[in-house]
Amino acid sequence: MTRSGGRWKDLPERFGKASTVKRRYDDWMARGVLAEIRPLMAEEADLEWICVDATIVRAHQQAAGAAWEKRA
């Protein structure tokens, strides 16, 4: 959520209350838990299943070719 700029309240309900997830994330960052997990996950990376979905990338409407109106 931090990197993507997503909102905590947009997490699926199966993760629990957004405030609890955010508090746990902040706690894990402060204690260095995530820094320890990252290298372990990279060791067993299965790159065959990686997918980047461009539909989540937001752009301004003019970037998509929309007509531009000058406001007075």
Image (cartoon, helix red, strand yellow):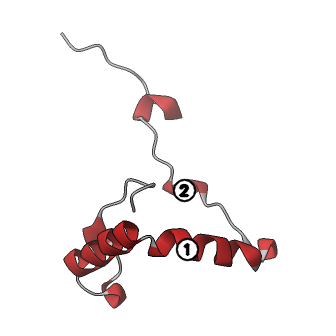
Q: Residue at the spot x=81%, y=74% of the render?
A: 48
| Viewer-closest of 44 and 39 | 39
The residue wearing badge 1 is 36
Q: Which of the pair 47/13 is nearer the observer? A: 47
User: Disc 2 residue type?
Assistant: Thr
Q: Is residue 35 left or right of residue 47?
A: left
Q: Nearer the viewer, residue 51 or 71?
A: 51
Q: Residue furthest front?
A: 31
Give the distance between the C-alpha atoms of the residues marked 1 and 2, in whole angstroms: 31 Å
Compared to 45, does 70 lie above or below? above
Mark 1 is surrounded, within 10 Å at the Cα level, by few (under 14), some (14 to 19) or many (20 or more) other residues, namely few
Hey, which quadrant is residue 52 in on the image? bottom right
Q: Is residue 45 visible?
A: no
Say whether residue 1 is visible: yes
Sequence-earlier tag: 1 or 2: 1
For mark 1, give the secondary structure. Answer: helix
Residue at the disc numbered 2: 55
Please name the amino acid that badge 1 sits on: Glu
